[in-house]
Structure formats: C-alpha cells, structure tokens
Amino acid sequence: MSTTSRRSFLRRSLMAAAAAAIAPSLPAAVSKSVSKQHSGRPKAKRVLMVALDGICVDGFKQARTPNLDALLADGVLSTDTRVVMPSNTQPNWMSHLSGSGPEIHGVDRNDWLLDNHTLPSLVTDTDGYYPTLFKVLKDNVAGMATAFYYNWAELINPYNRRYLDEVSFEADDRYLDNYAKALTFMRQHREDPTVVFLYSVHTDHAGHKHTWMSPQYIAAIEEADVHIGDLFDSMKADGLYDDTHIMFITDHGGINYGHGGMSVNEMIVPWGITGPGIARGVKMTEPNNTVNTASVILSLFGVEQPLCWTGEIPGSIFA
C-alpha cells in the first residue's frame, strides 16, 4: 500500500470512528422521530380534529375540562406547541391543514381570498388553491370521506371545496348542529377512511370580548368541553370511538383583548392526539408546530406528504 493510500485509509477510519462516537450523543427524541416516520404502522380508519379557536395554555390548564383531560390522558399532550407567525386565525388553521407555513401557502391574514392576497402560494391545484390534506388524501386514499364544519364565515376561504364531501357553516357562534352533523357523517362513513375537521370560534370570541383568561373566556372553554364529552359519549355508543384517532388542536393563544403578536401567551398552545398506535399518557417534549398536524394525519393513513410541505412527524407520539 502506498503512503498516499495508507493516509487515505487512516483518514476514512478516523472519520468513521468519530461518526460512531458522535451518534449516541444525538437526542433520543430526534433519533426516534427519524426512525418512526417510516415504520410499518397500520393505516388509520378515521381522524377527527376537535378544533377550538384561541386556546392559550394557561386557559387550557385553568379551565375545568374533564372530557378533554380524559381524552389526552389516554394519548399524547403537548403544552408548548408553537404556532406560525402571525399568531392569527386564518394563517394557523391553514398551516394545521396544509403542513406548511404562510411563507409557503401564502395565507398570511384573516381576510385572505383566492383573488385578493399578497403572496402567491408556492404550488397550487388546477383551481388555484394550495394543496391541503383534503386534496392529498382524496388523491391517494380510495374512498376517502372528508368533512369541514365551521362557524367563522371566512375560515373556508383558503380551501378548495372540490375535496370536501360535506361543508357546514353555523352562524352566531353556534356549533351544536355541526357536532351532530359530524357524528352523522362518521356514522354514514363508518366503513370508509374518514377525516373530519370540527371547529368552533366561540372560545376566541369570548377572549376578544372579555379578555383572555377572563371568567367568560374560561367558561367558554368549559362549555365546549361539555359538548365535546357528549360527542365522545355518542361515538362510544355507536362503536366509533375506539378506532378513531382524535386530535385536539387550536390556532393561537391571546393576551388582553387580542392576538397576532409574538408573546408566549399568543405563540404557544396545547396540541394533543389519541387513537390506535398512539402512545398513552405521554407529555410530549419534542419541538412541535401547527404545521405538523397535517403531516401526522397523512402518516396515519400511510400517505407521503407533498414535497412543498414542511411539516414534521414527531416520533414520540407513537407507541
């Protein structure tokens, strides 16, 4: 072996030894995330997103929410999930449902419209909309059923209804009819892969009217929990609960009478998931963001996310 070859061999050997020494020092959460993303998990049967607007961490902790508490005690809960900037409604719900931030999907303000916006979406479908999880699932999962229930009129604007089988709006902060419709939809599609987005804005409006952390704001969260519990009871009676992945998500917190800034109370929120194959009784410590929600849902159905998405799949959520 020549002197040059011996030097090259020694250099490669030293690099390999250094890599082996460094690898064990990687955080366990990081290595788990990478390995879990590609594990052979069974595909989900249905996913229900319970979406409440404007839930700050302190409000979630202070409110009496026995039904959400019981749900998340049986799954994974994060109380330090970051939202995208700005900490407003439309940008963050779009980020939840599209696996991307405003710099990619272009929805940067609450009054965004398909024909009136500042930044074009990086990628669009044939109708001009950024691809959300509803489109990706419809394109990749045979028989996929999708539903979108909401009570803030503007919320639907960034979503292409072509990929939604049922859309229902309730005015004046009402939401109980939508809860009933969501249950009926899941019953009708019990044998189909299903994704349901079930949203209410009344919690956010209580904060705007009375301030975040006011008695009225806390009461709005507690009221929602009662009806969430009723929904869960009905799902259990119908045999729809145990095989459903349920996610609890929100878009931002708040401070005083509003949000949109970068304070901890506005930017950090709760996030949770339960269901088959999900870890139980886990307090999530991995970094998490609203952009991860759609990525997790695609993973549950065994679908790869589009190249334009930036969401990650936190490995610690899986059993």
Image (tube, rainbow, N blue to C red):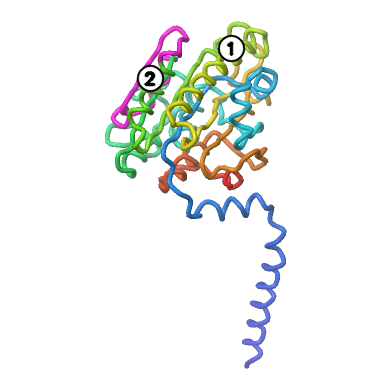
> Taking 171 as reference, is 250 above or below it?
below
> What is the crowding at mark 1: few (fewer than 14 residues within 10 Å), some, or many (at least 20)?
some
Q: Nearer the viewer, mark 2 or mark 1?
A: 2
| Foreground residue among 130 and 253 | 253
Specify the quadrant of the image occupied by residue 159: top left
**Residue 175 locus on image (x, y percent):** 45, 14
Q: Which residue is mark 1?
A: 220
Q: Which residue is mark 2?
A: 181
**Residue 249 locus on image (x, y percent):** 54, 28
> Taking 305 as reference, is 210 above or below it?
above
> Which range of residues does the magenta coloring cover?
152-177
Amino acid at the residue labelled 2: Lys
Specify the quadrant of the image occupied by residue 112: top left
Quadrant of the rendering where the N terminus is positioned: bottom right
Amino acid at the residue labelled 1: Ala
Q: Residue furthest bottom?
A: 1
| Foreground residue among 46 and 7 | 46
Marks 2 and 1 sit apart, C-alpha to C-alpha, by 21 Å
> What is the crowding at mark 2: few (fewer than 14 residues within 10 Å), some, or many (at least 20)?
some
- Magenta span includes 165: yes
| Foreground residue among 97 and 70 | 70
Q: Residue at x 60, y 43 (%)?
A: 279
**Residue 230 locus on image (x, y percent):** 51, 19
